[in-house]
Amino acid sequence: MAFLKRNLRNFYTVFFDDGSCKIKFRNLNSQKVILKEYFNTVRPKDGDLFKSVNEYLKDAKKDKKSYVSVIDGSLKHSLVMENSDNLKDKLTQKIDKNIIAILDEDKFQIYKENLEANEFEYISPFKVLYFLYKNCKLDGVNLFLIKFHQTIAVMVASKDKVIDAKMISLEESYEKMISENLDLDINSDEIFCAAIEKYLKQFYKKHDDFIEKIMIYGSIGPEIGYYIFTKIFIKTEVGMENIIDFANKINIKENF
């Protein structure tokens, strides 16, 4: 039955977020039946996070049918809605026709030097957002976002096209709030909401489109949706999809 074993495929998604790491793994047979899966938080070994990650990836190093994808929330990620000669010297990822992600080259080099896998795909958070947007099939203009520990990936899209996308720093939002009121007792929800408000003001200066709904993804509680609605007055929903699990499914869809 060795031929059955040869048809097995492994899919790893490694999620880095401000010094922390989580891994989603699925092992599938030729009929795409999941034989094994896990979702683990990775702890540094001897102070080395990559050392711990590589213990999970040890089979991927020798197995040509292992597919590794890496995602993070770097501020250097961006998205453009047209191809141009200006992109020739940049690390890019084509997501769809004329939808191109620009990746953080410095982070990519770090992963390339430290991850022990035959090869890996560095996935832009905007690629995940784009798939989520297509999966939702919402009418009107909507704001989609992924919350990381220190950043937010935001994307505004209508039914037919992506209108805008950028990375936002939560740290900048916090520093601005503190500078305006040193005695302010600020919690993470307030910082998150203030960052969204700032983005919306910038968006409406450049665009006439009215955002009808906000879809939030990430490690956050469902109550944040109501909190943001009371502050911004836009219907807000927390998506049920786990970002790491969803990115793993993208990996499977594109490589099986």
Image (cartoon, rainbow, N blue to C red):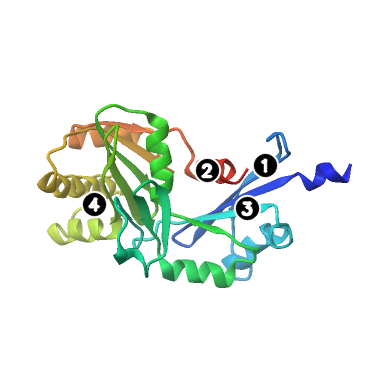
How far across and how far down the image is residue 137, in percent? Answer: 36, 28
- Mark 3 or 2 closer to N-term? 3
Q: In what quadrant of the picture does the N terminus appear?
A: top right
The answer to which of 75 and 103 lies nearer the viewer is 103
Q: Name the residue under label 1.
A: 37
Q: Mark 3 points at which residue?
A: 67
- Drawn side of residue 175 relative to residue 239, left or right: left
Name the element at disc 1. Answer: strand
Q: Distance between the residues labelled 4 and 1?
A: 42 Å
Q: How far apart are marks 3 and 4 (CA)?
A: 45 Å
**Foreground label between 2 and 4:** 2
Q: Residue 185 carries which label?
A: 4
Q: Which residue is drawn at 37% across and 36% down?
A: 133
Which residue, as the protein is rendered here, is positioned at the far front?
Answer: 85
Q: Mark 2 points at which residue?
A: 250
**In the rendered image, is residue 221 in sight?**
no
